[in-house]
Image: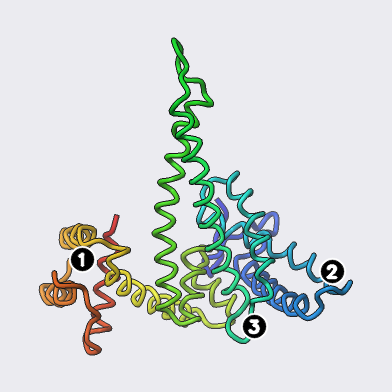
Amino acid sequence: MLPRSASGATCDTNRGYPTRKVEAEHRRDEWAEIQGLVIRVLQQRGTPEGEQHANRLLTLLRPHVLQLVRSVCRDADIAEDITQEVLARLWSRLDSYDATIAPFRNWMAQVVINATYNAMRGRARINRHELREADHTSVPNSEPSTSVRELSTAPEDLVEQVAARERMEQILAIARATLSPDEYLVWLEYTVNGSSHREIALLLERNESWARQTLLRARQKLAAALVLSPSVLSDEELEVAIERCQRSSEPLSAQELRLLRTYLAPGGRRAPAWHHLARFRRICLKLLNHLT
């Protein structure tokens, strides 16, 4: 195991591996280069200089696109294939990017994640068709061959994976609608890319305290939005989460539970009054820790 520096970053003192701080600074500089390249590509389309910038941009983008695709699709081989499709989709939509609205990395993350879900849904439809055809194939007097066995199980696994990822797509859509640009970016970095508070602070040129507070605020706001979304969390799922929370070492107080029930009434979930909002968000975040 690599030793840790005083800051908590891992390093290899014998081989001189870069610290997490240096890596985060490198990522920040790389995204700054990507942002600049995007602008130059859009301004110089059809020129030799534009072609050079485009080649460099694609080289820098590919590992970031692959990382986002892998956060949605856990199968490495499928992720590699989908990455090519997603890169093509991203490139075809580049003209629609507006630097005055959002940083490119925010815009890119949304395009890549949506394109990945679409690609996975397409593959699931193909595999379901193959599965139906395989159902009519018999292998008399023998065990199913490896190919038939794989054909009989892999599509079902992929369909389940797509269903789970479609739910995640809903969560991402709610996050985009609920959070501010800074909150969404910090939440996305922490949740999807696995960045630490320190790395996020370095990447966004802010201090670590800001990163922690922004992430906490984002998680609380998103938790409340999810609890109030029946399409994402069913009544049964919420009841199970409440039951587990109440059996945990940090259950909701009677007052917290009463407040939660007030806005999850059988007649329909409703947003809390402004004077209950902050507390409701904290309760929801506490509750979501007990979801399956």
Residue 19: image location, x then y, percent: 63, 65
Query: What is the distance, in whole Å, between disc 1 and disc 2 at their CAs?
Result: 57 Å
Nearest the eye: 256 or 121:
121
* Residue at figure coordinates x 55%, y 54% from the top left: 119
Q: What's the residue type where badge 1 is placed?
A: Glu
Number of residue marks = 3
- What label sits on residue 99 in the rendered view? 3
Q: Amino acid at mark 3?
A: Ala
Q: Along the polypeptide, which appears first: circle 2 or circle 3?
A: 2
User: Upstream in the sequence, badge 1 or badge 2?
Assistant: 2
Residue 221 in the image: state x and y as whole percent: 35, 77
Q: CA distance from mark 2 to mark 3?
A: 21 Å
Question: Residue 201 versus residue 110: which sits nearer the camera?
Answer: 110
Residue 250 badge: 1
Q: Which mark is residue 143?
A: none
Which residue in the structure is indicated by mark 2? 52
In the depicted structure, whether residue 79 falls above or below residue 51: above
Q: Badge 1: how crowded within 10 Å, few (<14), some, or many (20+)?
A: few
Report the residue that reaches farthest toward the bottom. 275
Name the residue at 68% across, 54% down.
14
Front position in the image: 285 or 118: 118
Q: Amino acid at mark 2?
A: Gln
Rendered image quadrant of residue 275: bottom left
Which residue shows up at 63% across the image and 48% down it? 81
Q: Position of residue 238 (x, y in %)?
A: 22, 62
